[in-house]
Image (cartoon, grey):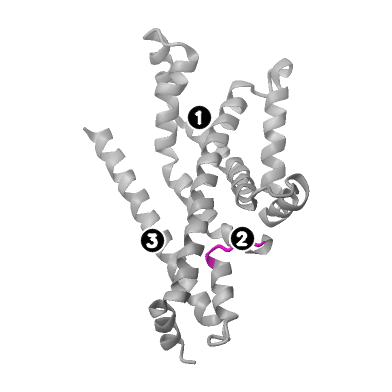
Amino acid sequence: MNIFSGIIEIFTSTDYMSYVWNGLGKTLLISVFASLLGLVLGIIVALVKISYPKRKKALCVPNAICSAYVTIIRGTPVALQLFIMVFAIFAIRGFPVEITAILTFGINSGAYVSESIRAGILSVDKGQTEAGLSLGLSGGQTMRLIVIPQAIKNVIPTIGNELIALIKETSIVSMVGIVDLTFAAKIIGAGDKMADYLVPMLVAAIFYLAVVYILTFVIKYVEKRLRRGDRT
């Protein structure tokens, strides 16, 4: 089968496209919720590591826990983490495997985001914190209202790159039976008429590329708006 005609056949087939759209929806569902979880975890871990520095030995336990979390998660393959979560930790009859995938990728993303957020917080001038305290704000209010917003603004490109990587990494959920975009392509390729995995995989690649392109555009747009806000 000609590759171009095969791609056209998939795009014009209601049956094939139903698999693609459903798979894309599952990919985006896992990616969005995992990224939100990762952002929340990343901020919490970053704040803990900054609030409880190692040099304060009496208060280093929270820092040690967060450091161990970051080291273990960043030092092991996400595929292995997914298998452990699905077949060991959440091996509960009837427990939705999609939620397990969201938790896995969210926890994985949080380890990377935490380092980005921590670097962003440390990049904010200490004068900002002193100014907040001088205005009568507490340490927590200063961090929440002044420091963290500036830190996130500084690391938006890094967080955006992590989100893009997360969307592509979710393709491994097909190994645990979730019908995402990649698995949908495998199903189409296994059909009697198609009998070829190359064409449906190319279609899946087109959709991944489109999602990444749109996300990249949105990230750049947000960056420009934030720069414009800084200038005004």
> Mark 3 or mark 2, which is nearer the start of the sequence?
2
Q: State the residue position of label 1.
A: 122
Check disc 2 and give the amino acid type: Ile
Which residue is nearer to you in this view: 82 or 114? 82
**Cα distance in 3D space between marks 3 and 1:** 31 Å
Q: Residues within 10 Å of mark 1 (few under 14, many from 20)?
A: few
> Mark 2 or mark 1, which is nearer the start of the sequence?
1
Which residue is nearer to you in this view: 34 or 132? 34
Q: Residues within 10 Å of mark 2 (few under 14, many from 20)?
A: some
- Left or right of residue 179, residue 221 in this image: left
List x then y, in percent, for residue 54.
Answer: 68, 24
Under tag 2, what secondary structure?
loop
User: Residue extending furthest right?
Assistant: 88
List x then y, in percent, for residue 102.
Answer: 59, 47
- For image coordinates 62% across by 42% down, the residue present is 107
- Is residue 178 part of the magenta span, yes or no? yes
> Mark 1 or mark 3, which is nearer the start of the sequence?
1
Specify the segment rendered in magenta. Answer: 177-181
- Is residue 128 part of the magenta span, yes or no? no
Label disc, if present, on residue 213 of the rendered structure: 3
Q: Where 28 sits versus 119, above or below?
A: below
Under tag 3, what secondary structure?
helix
Q: State the residue position of label 2.
A: 178
Under tag 1, what secondary structure?
helix
Discs 2, 3 touching: Cβ within 8 Å? no
- Left or right of residue 160, residue 100 in this image: right
User: Residue extending furthest left?
Assistant: 232
Residue 191's image quarter? bottom right
Check disc 1 and give the amino acid type: Leu
Which residue is nearer to you in this view: 82 or 128? 82
List x then y, in percent, for residue 134.
Answer: 39, 9
